[in-house]
Image (cartoon, grey):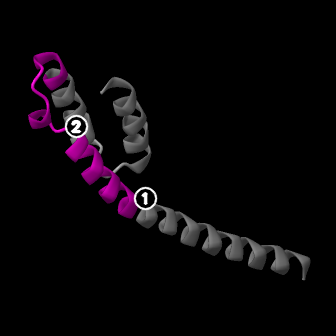
């Protein structure tokens, strides 16, 4: 009986973990989309006339585009953008 209960508890834990992970993935994608739009708008190179700022904005825009679905990287880039621009 004890072995059966352990097996059942393991199955419950696996099911719960899978649901949590899938919820985090979907939530990250939804958050990433809105953050991506905000960052892409703020670092778009056409907003800057100074050549140095424009080059920096182009590099940051490239990095934002590369990580458009990665929420955690976009959060890091947001902090970097606030510090540089």
Q: Is residue 26 above or below residue 34?
A: below
Magenta span contains residue 45: yes
Q: CA distance from mark 2 to mark 1?
A: 21 Å
Q: Is residue 52 left or right of residue 24?
A: left
Tell me the tag on residue 43: 2
The answer to whether residue 68 is seen in the rendering is: no
Q: Residues within 10 Å of mark 1 (few under 14, many from 20)?
A: some
Q: Quadrant of residue 61?
A: top left
Q: Is 46 part of what is drawn in magenta?
A: yes
Q: Horizontal and vertical percent for residue 45?
A: 13, 33
Magenta segment range? 29-54
Residue 15 horizontal side relative to residue 72, left or right: right
- The foreground one among 17 and 78 is 78
Please give left or right for residue 54 compared with residue 2 in the image. Answer: left
Residue hosting label 1: 28
Residue drawn at x 68%, y 75% is 11
Q: Quadrant of the C terminus?
A: top left
Question: Is residue 62 toward the left or the right of residue 71 in the image?
Answer: left
């Amino acid at each position: 009986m004890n072995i059966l209960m352990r097996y059942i508890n393991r199955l419950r834990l696996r099911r719960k973990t899978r649901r949590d992970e899938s919820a985090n993935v979907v939530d990250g994608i939804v958050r990433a989309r809105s953050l991506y739009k905000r960052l892409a708008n703020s670092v778009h190179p056409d907003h800057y006339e100074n050549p140095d700022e424009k080059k920096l904005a182009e590099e940051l825009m490239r990095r934002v585009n590369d990580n458009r679905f990665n929420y955690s990287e976009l959060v890091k880039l947001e902090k970097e953008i606030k510090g540089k621009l």
